[in-house]
Amino acid sequence: MMFKGLSVGRLKGVNQHRQVEWGRRGRLSYLTIALLFSITMILSVSQAQISTTRWTNPAGGDWHNSSNWDNGVPDANKQAVIDLPGTYTVRINSPATAAGLVLGNDDPSDTGTKTLTVSSTLTLNGNGVIKPRSVMVLTGTLTGSGRMQVEGLMEWRLYGRMEGQG
């Protein structure tokens, strides 16, 4: 059986089993393919469990106040999105965790500046991005396993720390 460069055939010998050939480079058994498929499905399900919560307070305020978010305070399974148009500051004064972070938006009509002040520890379990016209002021610790993409401004002040694998 052939499918876009894959061929399935039967081996001859004592331990006959089906396998998939990837051209002449190597062979993967059905067991290996099933294992890879299972891992992919588990990772897909894990990613599907991540939800988003958006900042809703145009005056700014405390990160830990659930009324400032449309889906509750960000946590290990909720990505924080701070993209409400306008100029305001969101403050993290005690340890916080989020599945990821989007600070700012790409709307050219929004001329306001979104500022996130981190004076404690912010742990990101995924990636973060600081969009144009957005500022992260770091006097505490930014840590986590993802990457931080800075398109706006990041002020890394005295005693601020960044640590992690990303």
Image (tube, rainbow, N blue to C red):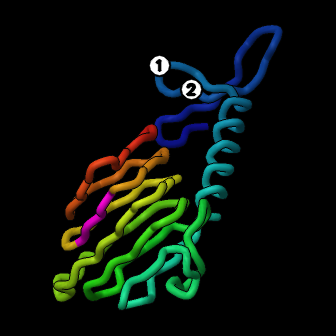
x and y, in percent, of residue 33 in the image: 66, 35
Query: In what quadrant of the picture does the N terminus appear?
Result: top right
Q: Dot 2: within a 10 Å radius of its alpha carbon, few (fewer than 14), some, or many (20 or more) residues? A: some
Residue projecting furthest to the front: 158
Which SS class for mark 2? strand
Look at 47% across and 70% down and name the residue there.
80
State the residue lying farthest toward the right. 14
Residue 48: tell me if it is visible: no
Q: How many marks?
A: 2
Residue type at mark 1 is: Arg
Q: Which residues are magenta?
A: 134-138
Q: Nearer the viewer, residue 37 or 24?
A: 37
Instruction: Please tell me whether residue 40 is drawn above or below residue 25 in the rendered image.
Output: below
Q: Position of residue 12 (x, y in %)?
A: 73, 13
According to the picture, the residue beneath numbered tag 1 turns out to be 24
Quickly name the residue at label 2: 21
Across and down, in percent, residue 113 comes to: 23, 78
Mark 2 in CB contact with mark 1 (< 8 angstroms): yes
Q: Give the residue displayed 70% in from the left and 44% down from the top.
A: 38
Mark number, residue 108: none
Check the image and report above or below for 165 versus 9.
below
Q: Is residue 26 left or right of residue 49?
A: left
Q: Residue at x 27, y 88 (%)?
A: 86
Q: Amino acid at mark 2?
A: Glu
Of the 4 image quadrants, the one containing the C terminus is: top left
Label 1: how many residues lie within 10 Å, few (<14), some (14-19) or many (20+)? few
Pick the front one: 150 or 159: 159
**Disc 2 and disc 1: Cα gap in Å?**
7 Å
Can residue 56 be seen in this snapshot?
Answer: yes
The answer to which quarter of the image holds residue 165 is top left
